[in-house]
Amino acid sequence: MDGGGNTGPIGGLRTEVSGLPESGIVELVNYGREVTARDGRDLIGLWVGEGDQPTPAFIMDALERSLRAGNTFYTYQRGTPRLRQALADYHSRTYGLTFPMERFYITHSGMQAIMLSMQSLIGPGDEVVLPTPIWPNVLSAVQILGGKTVPVPADLGNAGWTVDLDRLMEACGPKTKAIVLNSPCNPTGWMMPREQMIALRDFARMRGLWIVADEVYGRMVFDRHHAPSFLEICEPEDRLLVVNTFSKNWAMTGFRVGWVVAPPSLGQVFENLVQFNTSGVAVFLQDACATAVEDGDAFLARTIDRCRQGRDLVEARLSALPRVRFGRSAGGFYTFFAVDGEADSRALAFRLVDEAGVGLAPGSAFGPGGEEYLRLCFATSTARLSEAMDRLEPVLS
Amino acid sequence: MDGGGNTGPIGGLRTEVSGLPESGIVELVNYGREVTARDGRDLIGLWVGEGDQPTPAFIMDALERSLRAGNTFYTYQRGTPRLRQALADYHSRTYGLTFPMERFYITHSGMQAIMLSMQSLIGPGDEVVLPTPIWPNVLSAVQILGGKTVPVPADLGNAGWTVDLDRLMEACGPKTKAIVLNSPCNPTGWMMPREQMIALRDFARMRGLWIVADEVYGRMVFDRHHAPSFLEICEPEDRLLVVNTFSKNWAMTGFRVGWVVAPPSLGQVFENLVQFNTSGVAVFLQDACATAVEDGDAFLARTIDRCRQGRDLVEARLSALPRVRFGRSAGGFYTFFAVDGEADSRALAFRLVDEAGVGLAPGSAFGPGGEEYLRLCFATSTARLSEAMDRLEPVLS
């Protein structure tokens, strides 16, 4: 007799979880680890969303000072007052508006910011509408919660990537609880125009929908100070959650700290969600993050400049390859490109590891519309990117 | 028109989440923070589950070495090979059995170990049977996932706390997916006998149920080397998840790192759950944890001894108070006691902050059966505990 319907551990799990796809990015990274372990080969990994710079020394110093000061105990579930205030100041000076610290909640990564946002909104049968290609972890977070994602594929035309707002709105039905927007977009580099944000805000207000805005790359833009943000056009008590991370701006992917900007009325809700998921973030990590935000403007400016150089190099080299198609990246870390005659991006990504020694992420990982593409992260030195392009060209020509 | 049925952010949330109770422990801690900010008063906080020792220097040193070595990038979702192997070795020497590293998955805290376990098992309508009083975060994790907890109150008699296994089994119905056991128990100090574990294992096998064992206090025992563990009596591919944390044994509450021992066949499942919740734990934290496990036996032995002294002091002092009832703690950090004539533990806990300057956790936070109790964490110096008892006696006499 077996009440679970099957024998064995897997048979006893929720199908939403046992059926989760392996991250299509992690799958390649794991393959790369195997190849390196086997051949000792120097792979150039441009598959994940992180740069090649270690966390700057002034941030490490701040962590160590805090640690040695004895900050090794439990702390505030909403985040330390210092870090919340530092984020309020950062947003105020970034957008030229006033943000109180009560709108900021500290999470264990931008990923957790997304997961907690989804926990607050999405239950079984609820729908989330979103443009694709998109960072696939959003899709999986919704699946874990029993929700359904409704993809609306973006288009790559002569003007670069565009999202058809009418199609996005038409995709919202009676079960839709939220619309997820990621601008600047990982993986496409699309940047949502302010007029589209206003139109979508008005639509969401009318329909009582939530907007969950992943604005992780909001500063990683190349022709202006910051990307348009829903924070500039929404009221504090709009149904808006903005998710973000310290990972990209301040080279802190390895720290796993992020934040949510939420309506002040949700303070207790986010306190509870943090408590019941991970019970807060280490004080010494939060102190390091506060220092990053307080003293990291110069580092951020250099990082943006570095990414611009990376983008320009990669786009110039790819432009010379007749089989390659892509839209110029308005923001973010990535060039997302297709190769004529290569419809299976996953197979191509494996081949590029084997034949070129370069790790890229397969576009098939990013939902409908990405199948023919590869994602290349250009947040790396131009020397390393040149070498990567040298290796890629023979296969992509 | 409002598709959400209500206006305002709260009205748009899932009721399972907007209706989450504030942690009854955090509520008191937050009140204590207010009182201290207002009066500058020296509260003795024995409300949360942590000791008064900062993380030992050799663990901080390990963190700093790893950080300075440049370990500030993304890493393995299952945990670093070094830490997983260190845990395998630790379990092998603790239990005198052989554990391969493939059974260990690193999480962002013991709390996350519970949340990910519940995500893998519990969806809407699914039931979790558990003895109460119990650490309340388990109840809330199940609620967030739309599941239902079925409490089976434990009994305090002359032999201390006991759990009636027949009642626990009778509480398991067709919707039951899992039984949660926490031994040694937070808050009661109950330790599950090995014979009960075997009986429950056999019952769970017969019914295809999962056992989720919170063995966080498995080493914090005072009359033996370790508490009986489900790991000693189950096979690797049994439906068993054991959750644990570095917080208690090695004074690392502020680090937020834990682990799950799961069937090897669930490797991809836990890799995915980590990926889609927080995307891994900082390498420098994992390196610190590995050093704690590798080199921390002496520290652990001193910590256990310190807790024994704390327990003996608190129990001796409480025994002298005629209104106070409690069961001797076989393990864990806590004395859980009732005060005759004080049925409302939450009100009493607030009064003790105001009148005695001592912070205790109200038993009402721990589910059915705890309403008349208070939880005192004795993982603190005997000097501080003496002072706390001096302050408590006038109110509890």
Image: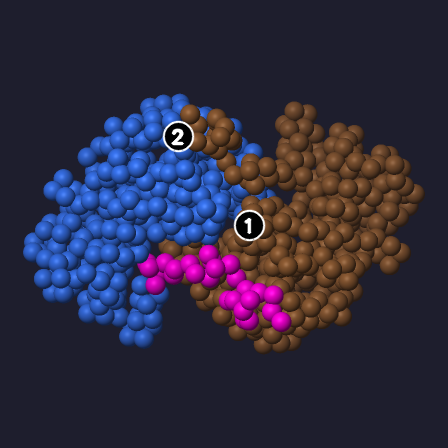
Chain colours: A brown, B blue
Name the spot of residue B157 as percent of width and height, x first.
14, 43
The quarter in which the C terminus of chain A is drawn is: top right
The reply to whether residue B85 is in sight is no
Q: In the image, is B141 to the left or to the right of B378?
A: right
Separation of disc 2 and disc 1 at Cα?
Answer: 26 Å
> Residue B91 falls in which quadrant of the image?
top left
Number of numbered discs visible in the structure rendering: 2
For the view shown, which residue lies furthest in the front direction? Answer: B174
**Residue B143 in the image, given as x and y percentages of width and height:** 43, 51
Reading the image, the residue beneath label 2 is: B207
Q: Mark 1: which amino acid?
A: Pro
Q: Which mark is residue B217?
A: none
Q: Is residue B55 above or below residue B270?
A: below
Q: Nearer the viewer, residue B342 or A293?
A: B342
- The quarter of the picture where residue B299 lies is top left
Q: Residue at x 55, y 38 (%)?
A: A15
Secondary structure found at label 1: loop
Q: Where the N terminus of chain A falls, by quadrant? A: top left
Q: Residue at x 84, y 36 (%)?
A: A342
Question: Residue B17 magenta-drawn?
Answer: yes
Label 2 is found on which chain of the structure? B
**Mark 2 surroundings: few (<14), some (14-19) or many (≥20) residues within 10 A:** some
The region drawn magenta spans B1-27
Name which residue type carries label 2.
Answer: Arg
Circle 1 residue: A124
Residue drawn 41% across the image and 34% down it: B210
Q: Position of residue A36 (x, y in %)?
A: 66, 30
